[in-house]
Amino acid sequence: MIQSRTEDPALRPGAAAGADDRPASAEGDTLVEVEGLTVDLPHRQGATRLVDGVSFRMKRAEKVALVGESGSGKSVTARALMRLNPKLTVAGRVVVDGIEVLGLPERKLGTVRGRRIGMAFQDAFTSLDPIMPVGEQLMEALVVHGVSRREARQRAVRLLAELGVTNAEGRMKAYVHEFSGGMRQRAVLAMALIGEPQLLIADEPTTALDVRIAQQVLDVLEDVAERRELAVLLITHDMGVVASFAERVLVMYSGRIVEDANVESLFARPLHPYTEGLLGAVPRVDRSVERLVAVPGVPVPPGERPAGCAFHPRCAAATDVCRGVVPPLRTFGSRRVACHHAEERGASDAV
Amino acid sequence: MNLTIARGAFRTAPPLFDTAVYAIVALMIAMAVVGPMLAPDSVYVSDIGNALMPPSAAHWFGTDDQGRDVMWRVIAGSRATLLSAMLIVTAYSLIGVLIATLATVGPRWLDETLMRMTDIGLALPGLVVALGFAAALGPSLQSAIVAKAITGWPVTARLLRGIMRQTMTAQFVVGAQAMGVSRWRLMTRHVLPNSLDILVVKWAGDIGAAVLVLAGMSFIGVGAQPPSAEWGAMIASAKGYVANAWWVVAAPGAAIALAAVGFGLLGDILQVRRDPSLRGRS
Amino acid sequence: MNALQSKWLPGGVFVARRLAVTALTLLGLVTLVFAMIKAIPGDEAQVAAGPEASPAQVELVRQRMGLDAPLVVQYGRFVGQVLHGDLGTSVSTLQPVLDDVLKVFPSTLELVIVTLLLSLLLAVPAAVAAATWRDSTFDRACRVGAVAAGGMPTFWLALLAQYVLASRWGLLPISGQQSLDFSVQVRTQMPVVDALLAGDLAAFVDALRHIVLPAFSLAAFFAAQFFRTLRASLIAILESDFIVPVRAKGASFARIMLRHALPNAIGPTVTLVGVLLGMMIGSSVLVESVFGRQGVGAYLSNAVEQKDTYAVLGAVLFVGAVVCVSNVLVDLLLLAVDPRVRAAQLHGSKR
Amino acid sequence: MRIRRQAVEGRWGQHWGQWGRQVAVLGAAAIALSGQATAQTKFDRSKTVIFANGGVVATLDPMRTDYAQTSFIASTLYDTLVTYDKGGKLVGQLAETFELASDAKSINVLLRPGVVFHDGSPVTAQDVAYTLDRLKRLGLGIASQIDGYDKTTVHDARKLTIRLARPDSLFLGALSKVYILEAKLVAANVGTDDAQGWLQTHDAGSGPYTFAGRRNADIVVSQFPGYWNKADGRPEQIVFRRIDEGATQRDELRAGNVDLAVLGMGYRDAALLDKEGRVKDARLKPELQTNIIFNTRTGPTADPRVRRAIRLAYDYQGGLSAIRQGNGVIASGPLPATMSCRPDLPAAHRDLAEARRLLAEAGVKNLQITMRFQPTVEVQRLEATLLQSNLAEIGVQLKLEPISFAAYLASVARFDSIPQMMLLDDFAQFPDPGSILLRGYRSDAVGTNRSGYANPKVDALLDAAKASSNPTQRCDLYKQVQTILDKDSVIMPLYTVGRPVTYRPQQIQTPEVSKVVFPLAPADLRLAKKS
């Protein structure tokens, strides 16, 4: 269902990414539109479906959390926005700031990568080139888009300082093994933001850090997103992070979106049994919880996705229809949920 | 960063390729074991009358400068060539393991001296030792084997020491140390087994290289002597006939190349088997 | 200590330590070879005096050459001389060994350097292309080619190349280092370099044509080894975690390969150059004999045959020195390439 | 593959066997340019002869003409007092007249007038005296041929008498190997090593060519205009080029880059080239014989019957035709067939029955003997393997043991270390039978008597020959010695062999054998007559 797009007038050749001349957004305040995204991993005996028909939207400056256990396809989905999965076959429709990403020729991807979307990775230590000075890698993000080295250096130093890296000028020449955990994460963040993208994808930015530094990084992330009216797609499996940062939550399970709601209503009343299970596993400040209940069973490997609703083997409320038919993602007010028994679980009176 | 000399195995190595390599190696070993028994004695008797006959029904690879059947000589010579190659590689691998183990487990000064010895070994041109032995004991296959074994161990010693030191500092070993396990028991139970399977991989790969070196030595006259049918000696004695009797040079050359390729790829396959993550990378 | 000194001091200390170690190694080498040569049966004085000399004449020569002194004295005297740059006199040419070796060694060195350049010129581009288009027909062809080239005996290839390319088709000269019509002022005993220094273009081209076949026959084996090592490291690096973030910055594949993949992957190949250099010098004797070129290999093999002790020791010292110096250069190159190694080596952390 | 620097050793010149498979390359240590201006003369290829040879020239010092590479070049730069003509007769070169005294203890010489060295100064008796005294002082290389020399009395510029320590009828012939140096020039550059270093790269001679320095890795000599013995057709330059591999020599000859190839070319290659036609094989007939030397003192070969049995086992005809391509004749006696004073002895032949009978008579069963040979010489490798299979037919197991040149020299220096059997290509330094017999078979000639043979009767005959100045009497004595040696099977002569020398008839006339410079003297080469 890839729409072949002729040269779209809205596409601007990779002009210098000056902050002021940001191109007018094509369709109002929707920044990202994903429809029927499907990603397969080909191998000798056929292909394994990692992402099965995901659709969602993101408005400008909106902070969305994409949650799910590992192997649920959240990271693959995020990377599909920038077509960063070389060995996988990707189908569906992904429009970022008016640009149809999947149909774009490889050469033109530069207009998206680094300029409209920036990505920060989980383990900062392994996602930086060990033998190239960190400053150089920062500048590269701009030099690649035609910015002069001198200007790139200035902006890199300014951004590092803005993100709280002490003695930014000095650190430019240092290598990744000479950075502390927190500083490394800030550097990776800087690399994602330096191109002044409209959307920042943060792939589990805090998972590799201990709690205190993780909170510092989250605070920095929040300040920057606020200042730059930045849309953030935060990928995590930590519901605590979701609660403190995100405005809206997308819950994924075995390559499908099972629930989509704003964070308050989700925490107040989780509609999908899996979301309820996830929330059950989180210590709550606002109420006393005798025992944390972990979601029973083990995450489903992509290759062995059960028929019908993928969650049914682990779902207490599973019935015959769950085992047979894949529940569509139905809208109830501002929320969406993919469960045959949504109504019984109070979806009808959602707002 | 230890030096893993990875060889070119094919990425999704189709089983066909693996079996082909096994076939070559099996053929070589069979030739080495059975060959000399099957080969007629005429292989060592000069029959000057029909020297340098081109390949024909009677002689598939033609005859050499003394009228002996080239094909049978290649088969008869396979034992001399391959056995000596295996002997060389086994010898210097064992020396290498010994030196590396001592260097890793022993005190710092022992490590330092052994590494200096390895440097000397690496700097010593194999050619000189071979020539020295040839001049001392008279050129022969045995002196070539001893000479090559003496100049072969440094590379293995250095490679293994690097790997052993790395495994010694690996987490699980540090853990074991924390539980009071002695360095020596540590070496024998953890580090050595891991290094040994690397050694087996290198052993297979090195046999191919050893065949080449042995041939080189015979070519300059310090390896096997007449009437031996060692492949290097065959080429050496036939090199004058490249123009008018190409088959006398081509047959042993092809045999050497086949052995080198066969064992080389065997090394790769074993390497991939040992560490699947290397599949397709090497 | 100003910044500059502190920056270079550790490097200087490292090089000084390595050179001291090299001197120790060479001394060990000479001692080993001296003992070996003396163990060889055969009588040097007899060779010098000539086969038909009467015993009285042989004794006369023995005294004159100091061969009657006990071995230890001879060894002590030899090491003393070496420290003053005198490598002793050759039994067969009655010339100082240093002059003899300086006449033959440069042309081997030139052949080895050209072979090294040729093998890297063949191996590096092929490895980069093979790693880029992995498992393409080009990749498979290169790998089969490398396996075949790695399996072919050098002298066999030299014989075939000489016969086919030079004798039969006459494309290249059959033997020798320079054709008779050119005579260039000898400065370095390296035909190609001398022709260049003399500015005689025709002679330069002629010398190059003479070196192509020998270098090509020698390079085939080594190019195969370099190709396989570099290709393996490149693929390993391309699959490592810091490559995706670089692509996320919008960098082109070419930039990723040249700025990130190659610098990280070159380490093992550079180490291999150091290890294989000794072997390259060793096998150059095979090629030099087939193509009738001057060389230290031939000088060495004859010196051993003639039991010309000092000539053997002189040649071995030169070959050993080149191998040791090149290993120091390799280590320095590794330091320059990889900051992590630099940190470990220079700042004395436990090696 | 290594061309070993072959010494032109007379009596047992085994290194002279053609080079073939294994040719030891001596590095180009020899001729340093050391500041001497290269002859930048532009080449006229049509008047130049390019002489390809294996091995590298160690030195140009004429004293070291015991090494083939030096002998080739020095023979063009220097002259000797006397030499041997094509027929093997002794004739004067620098000497106008020469005469051995009746007591064979001195030689009177009158020098040829008007002969000059390359720097123009005349050749005088003083130069001859200086050369002989220097040889005696240094005792190296060719000095071993004149070890009986005492001193020289110079009467005037042209008359001199050479005095010997003891009667030696061989000395006059040996003078054909002594090249005369210019005393004034050499003395001026004597340095500390009696001018050995200087002479390595300079010429102080009066020969037909002067040393014109090196051109790349080759050595060039150009014609000396003032030479006394004018001859037309001499090339203006001779370029000595080192090529060790027979195959490479063949290809360069075919391509016309080289005019003749002397050492390194195998018999088979030469024969094939000759058949092709463009390049011909001169098939020279030098005084060269392939012999197997027995150890007559110890081990199984001490028994003459065993030696005789082994002689009857070898396939002489097969070896000559297949290995030496028929380039030679089956041996008949210890001396090469081309030499004078030879008794008519039966040619070597094969008789397995007689061989087995002799072995039985000697009471020897499944005998095992070791034979040494030179791995660097291809034909020897083939002959050794052929003899091995022949001896197997009479139940004798021959073990082949390659030996290096230096090790062989050491083993023959003492009688107790002489190998059981040694395969050699024997070469006479000069065509006098004494040059082989006197040095090779006298019981006290340690180091040169390679078979350790001791026979008082032979010693007496040899001493008589050495002291007699009457050529016919000497000839008769030598014949008696050869008869005894053959009956006693001291050595096992295989065949008198020719030497393949391939050349381009378009460039040079057919080269002829030289009795003094093995196998040919470059100075004798003549350009082909352009029709």
Image (cartoon, coloured by chain):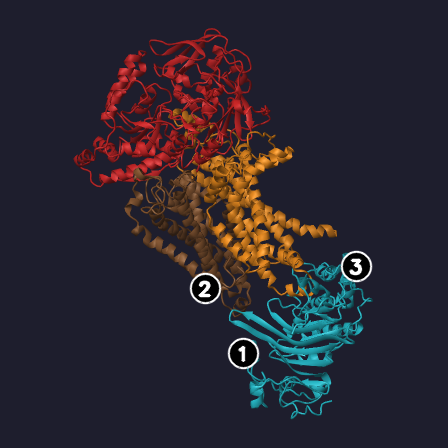
Chain colours: A cyan, B brown, C orange, D red
Q: In which quarter of the image is residue D287?
A: top left
Q: Residues within 10 Å of mark 3 (few under 14, many from 20)?
A: few
Element marked by disc 3: helix
Q: Are marks 2 and 3 on the same chain?
A: no
Q: Position of residue A78 (x, y in %)?
A: 67, 73
Query: Residue, x 55% and y 76% (percent of image)?
Result: A303
Q: In which quarter of the image is the N terminus of chain B?
A: bottom right
Residue C1 is marked as: none
Residue placed most toward the observer, B32 or B130: B32
Q: Residues within 10 Å of mark 1 (few under 14, many from 20)?
A: few
Please report contact status of discs 2 and 3: CB closer than 8 Å, yes or no.
no
Residue placed most toward the observer, D346 or A241: D346
Distance, label 2 to label 3, CA atoms, is 55 Å
Amino acid under disc 2 = Pro
Report which residue position mark 1 lands on: A304
Report which residue position mark 3 lands on: A151
Tell which circle, 1 or 3, labels the residue nearer the N-terminal end: 3
Q: In which quarter of the image is residue B133?
A: top left
Q: Position of residue D62 (x, y in %)?
A: 47, 21
Residue placed most toward the observer, D367 or A306: A306
Q: Position of residue A79 (x, y in %)?
A: 66, 71
Amino acid under disc 3 = Glu
Q: Is residue A205 above or below residue D223?
A: below
Q: Which chain carries label 1?
A: A
Report which residue position mark 2 lands on: B15
Distance, label 1 to label 3, CA atoms, is 51 Å
Element marked by disc 1: helix
Q: Which chain carries label 3?
A: A
Q: Are marks 1 and 3 on the same chain?
A: yes
